[in-house]
Image (tube, grey):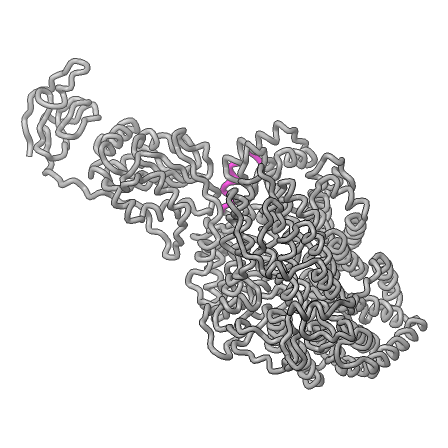
Amino acid sequence: MGLDVRPAMRAPAGDDSAKSGAGSVNTGGGSYVGGNVQAGEFVGRDKIVNEYVAGDKIVMAAPLAPPEPPFQVPRAAADLVARTRELTRLRLSLLDDSKHLLPNTVGLCGFGGFGKTTLAKLFCADPDVIAACSGGTLWVPLGKHPADARAQIADLVSALTGSSAGCATLAGAQARLQQALSGRAVLVVIDDVWDEAALRPIAEASSGCARLITTRNPDTLPLEAELIDIASMDAPDAAQLLSGGLPAGEAARLDALAQRLGGWPVLLRLANRALRQSLRQKVPLARALDGIEDEIRKQGVVAFDPQRDVAERDQAVAATVGASLAELPSADERARCAELAIFPQDVPIPLVRAAELWQLTAGYDAARSRKLVTSLLDPLSLVDFDGGADTLALHDVLRSFFAGQLENLADLHASLAVHWGERPPAGDAYAWRWLAFHRARAAALRAGPARHADVAALVELTGNAEWQAAQLAALQDLPALAAALNWSLDAALADDTPAGVPLVVAGADNLVRFRLEHLRPGPMFELARRGELDAARRRAALFDIDEHWRQALLLALVWLAPPHCRAEARALFDEIRPMLAAEAALHDLAAWVDAALKGAAPPRYPIPRPLAEIDPGLVEEILKRVGGGAFDREMLLSRNLDAGTDPDRPPTTLGVASGARGDAKVRYLAEVDAPVLVSFAALNAASGTAALARYLSVYTNYSYAEYRYASLWILLAQVVRAPDPPGAGWVQDAVVRVIEAALAGGSVEFDQGLAVVVRALRAGAGDHAAQTGLQAWTTQLLEQARALQYGRDPHASDVWGGHKRDMLAHAQALGWLLGMGALAEQLLAGAAAISDSGFAGYQAPACLALAETLFVCRGNAAAAATDIESAYAAAQHAAHNVQDASFCARMTARVQAMRRYWQPGFDLPQRAARLPDAAHLPEFAALHRVGHDYAGRRGDALELPDWAREDASLEGLARLYQRPVADFRRINASAGPFLYGDAVAVPDPGLLPHIAARLAAETLARMPAGAVPQELHWLKSFVRAALPSQTALDAVLSRLVLATARGAPPALLLDLAAALDGVLARRPPPAAADAAHELIAGRLPA
């Protein structure tokens, strides 16, 4: 309809009468359509922005109902994963305590593919957010090439009001949006901002309302914006995204893969799709994961980029990174950015070091380098710059991507290393710390003779005692030296020439020597006393010990921290305490530490034995007994401290006391002695400390590490329940002394197999003296084996299993390399005949070594099957007769795992490929059978406690095996309770080195007449897994050398032998174990 109106009347400036009454039009609630109205005047609710509209009538449209509040948020992906931590922070920023919308501006900033847009969608879909946004939620996608700002704003106006009238110009559209937003609870999401100029029109029009902006570049955000950095996904969220839609059963492996992919959502989603595609093709999940990991090794982070689906290519890694790189002004800046990939992973890069590199590669000065980082790379989120520390961080995925794009990676690493020289200035700590890293990477990335020369120089350098001393002096950081030696070994393992094999042995020897010379607990405690807790903790990580000992060690370090480090000590304590294992001693120790940190009174415990019974003479007799000397048995009998020792023959037993004759029960001497020692200290702290020091000096020399740790744990448990003399600090001092004694002791290892192989190399090259010597020594070994006796006599039994292993090393070299099968068979038979001689804890793994050597020598699983099973049976019998309950269960579980998973004929390529993920795979764990009866255990063995048979729950198994419950959950699909006969995977890091030896044996047994590159590659890959055990390492290195030598010409054999002789000559002479000073002697069960 039409309606005549009066001519519009001009109102004076500042007069609002034009908005109503004269000069205005009442539209009756309808929207203005057209008519002769002056611009700037109002028709109903609409302000006229055109100059004039043709016609002399105001044309009215029918009144419209106000539109529903808009919800423009795009639908999220079906496999979306909530990111709880980030969502919580967004809620705190945009919702008040009453869940009302706050008029704040929040910027989500992070690199492409980190999930900024996804997080914004998640937040908008939250029911509380939807309720708070009663006026609607607007979504504005900008992107790299945004649409016309006026048109986008007009669309927002239309969504809010139902009309875009008045939006013909940008200014008009902005004014209309401001009017539409006024008084409404609206959230405006502005997604994917690249340019501040593109954001500005919408930012100006939406000021004063709640806004959520996503961008890679924080410089594009309004000044008032609260910045939230979006980094990698948290581990649980990353694992959930990666495993979406996949069957159960490989959770631990998927967790590890998610970590390897850097928690980057775009990469996790691509990997998930690749896995699901494999499943659709009926590939089992385990094999699909094998394929994924293989592709990552070959192609890096671009392994899953879509090749055919054009619609998804913009979600690929290459496209995501490329979009940011394209914003850099030139190829020069892009090249400098990529060069950052040579710096170590997960370590902040000092800006001065990036500048140092760019000066070498492109002539940049410090100012230009700083400008590149702060003005370009950081704003584009290609790096994360920390102005306070003056460092930059590069995400792992970007680092991997850039490394894959660089063709001169080796030269870049070498440029820094050459610039620093072999011995940087003493004050250049950074160069000392990372010199070996860059030299190792440069060497490994080269090929042929150049690589071999670089590797040889590096192994020689890092193994040099003077260089090591200089590095330690510059850094005062033992883990840094360990890292340098590990990088050196990595480079040696990459050397694929035959001459590189002795370098592998030398690199491994450097690490073994490092452990022997430097892994002493004393300096670690001194670091803690000086307040250097982080350095002490990093040094603690070098010790290969069970988790309950590691936790006790960390608690002791916290306790030693000086008062001025109380905050750091408390933080470490709060981190440790929730993870403490079930052992009561740990919680008692934690109570002492907690009291010290709070300045509270320490725990109070009663004196364990009546003081009237304690005197220096009694303590002296206890010290004599534990040392293996003559002692006053009558005195100990009268105090009920020893009821079963033969008074006419001082025992060689140092760690176990037996009951009366005919009583099969035995106890650790520490159980008997510890209460006396603690009570003595309550009488006189100084004398108690002196007595404890003498007692511990005996245990420090125990070569049987498992029993040293078991005995000293008993002592530690008594010490932390001691009545501390006022002001004496005796408990703290005693705790440190006990832990130091446990960690300072050594163990008996067999590492003579490599020397046997070297003699075999010379024999194979035609050296008559070597041939004669091998045969003569073989004869002597057989004669000695026939003289060895059942039991554990230190002079007449194979106490440590070393004789058996020596026979096996000779059988392997003679039979597999030299073709002297008949002589090898004699040695194998002789080794099998002494399986019941010596300490059971050493015989069990030696019998497992017998089983694998049988297969190596015969090369035919069927021909060796019967004897292999006999060797397994002997191993299990020995394992059952290990005295300590936890060690007995652990050794038995190792035997059961070998029987189930590692019989000859397993899938060698698959197992070799999976070795890096061993911690997450049940076949690389030990194997417990619920209700196992230990039927081979002799009647005179230490009686297993009741709790050792409480194995139907993960908690019971965690106590038995002394491993955290979380470790059990990681590798077991079921959390229990378990039924009789169920198989449960047991986390056992100590088994992995022996699995590496088993893999090496399988490789050797299947190898054709000549060395094959694939087999040699596998053998080298087993070296690192074998490192924690010198015995296993010797087996792997021996088999690597044998594989290299088989079919080689005599000249190469002699060259290898000469080079290896040089390596062996640098080894310290072996220290003979004193069998008379072992925990248990004179009885077979160990």
Q: Which quarter of the figure is the N terminus placed in?
A: top left
Q: Position of residue 484 (x, y in %)?
A: 71, 49
Q: Position of residue 334 (x, y in %)?
A: 58, 39
Judge whether residue 495 can be spotted in this image. no
Examine the rendered structure and indicate whether residue 1038 appears above or below residue 815.
above
Q: Position of residue 113 (x, y in %)?
A: 46, 47
Examine the rendered structure and indicate whether residue 533 appears above or below residue 715.
above
> Is residue 882 rendered magenta in the image?
no
Left or right? Give the position of 348 relative to 808: left
Which residue occupies the foreground of this view, 147 or 432?
432
Which residue occupies the foreground of this view, 257 or 665?
665
Q: Which residue reaches farthest right?
A: 769
Left or right? Give the position of 1035 relative to 400: right
Which residue occupies the foreground of this view, 189 or 520?
520
Image quadrant where residue 351 sits: top right
Taking the spot 86% from the left edge, 59% from the top edge, the residue there is 1065
Q: Which quarter of the figure is the C terminus placed in?
A: bottom right
Taking the spot 26% from the left edge, 28% from the top edge, the residue there is 175
- Which span is picked out in magenta? 320-330
Judge whether residue 714 can be spotted in this image. yes
Left or right? Give the position of 826 relative to 664: right
Image quadrant where residue 385 sits: top right
